[in-house]
Amino acid sequence: MSLTRTDLFTATVQSESVPARLPASARPSEVVASLRAYGYAIVENLAPRVTNRVSSELEPYFLRVPMGTGSFTGERTQRVARLLVRSSGCAELATHPLVLEAAKSLLAGQCYHPQLAMTQAVRVHPGQSAQELHRDDNVFPYL
């Protein structure tokens, strides 16, 4: 399906309107529909207290990590990886029932036990140009 700018937050999938932005009360099937339509889903206010805690837990790492180098990684962009060992809040978000059920549903029939392979927080500073939409498949190539 080809999406235009006006389709940014709503797409038609199987004659059903699918929003990309979902409420915290969204069902796993709604998250999966958004993922299939757009490649992403935004669940608004899923866990605001946890999200605020994550911000605090990651701040010391952002204070130490350098900016990226080069135009692709962003010279005004910082990245922190290994989030589950650095932030208990990130572990809570990764194991949130909606996240787990959506992942299991999306991958049903393709894998038995989904595994989280990589986590990363990205802080884009003012003046950084937008990065091209891409997959990080160079990190984990398809074999």
Image (cartoon, rainbow, N blue to C red):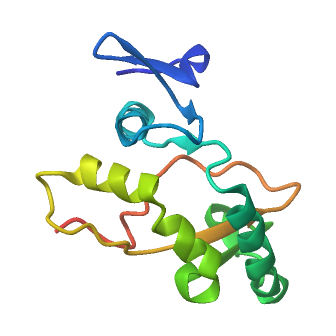
Question: Image height check: is 63 above or below 79?
Answer: below
Can residue 62 be seen in this snapshot?
yes
Place residue 17 in its image quadrant: top left
Please name whichever residue, 76 or 87, is drawn nearer the observer in this view of the structure. 87
Quadrant of the image containing the N terminus: top left
Residue located 44% across and 74% down the image? 118
Image coordinates of residue 96 in percent, x first then y, are 48, 62
Quadrant of the image containing the C terminus: bottom left
Image coordinates of residue 29 in percent, x first then y, are 34, 36
Image coordinates of residue 41 in percent, x first then y, are 50, 41
Question: Image height check: is 91 above or below 103?
Answer: below
**Does 2 sit left or right of 4 as displayed?**
left
**Does 69 sit left or right of 30 as displayed?**
right
**Does 65 sit left or right of 35 as displayed?**
right
Image coordinates of residue 33 in percent, x first then y, are 36, 32
Please name whichever residue, 73 or 88, is drawn nearer the observer in this view of the structure. 88
Please name whichever residue, 57 or 10, is drawn nearer the observer in this view of the structure. 57
Question: Image height check: is 141 above or below 103?
Answer: below
Place residue 2 in its image quadrant: top left
Residue located 36% across and 63% down the image? 137
Residue located 64% across and 82% down the image? 87
Question: Image height check: is 111 above or below 40?
Answer: below
Can residue 81 be seen in this snapshot?
no
Furthest residue toward right: 126
Count of labels in the image:
0
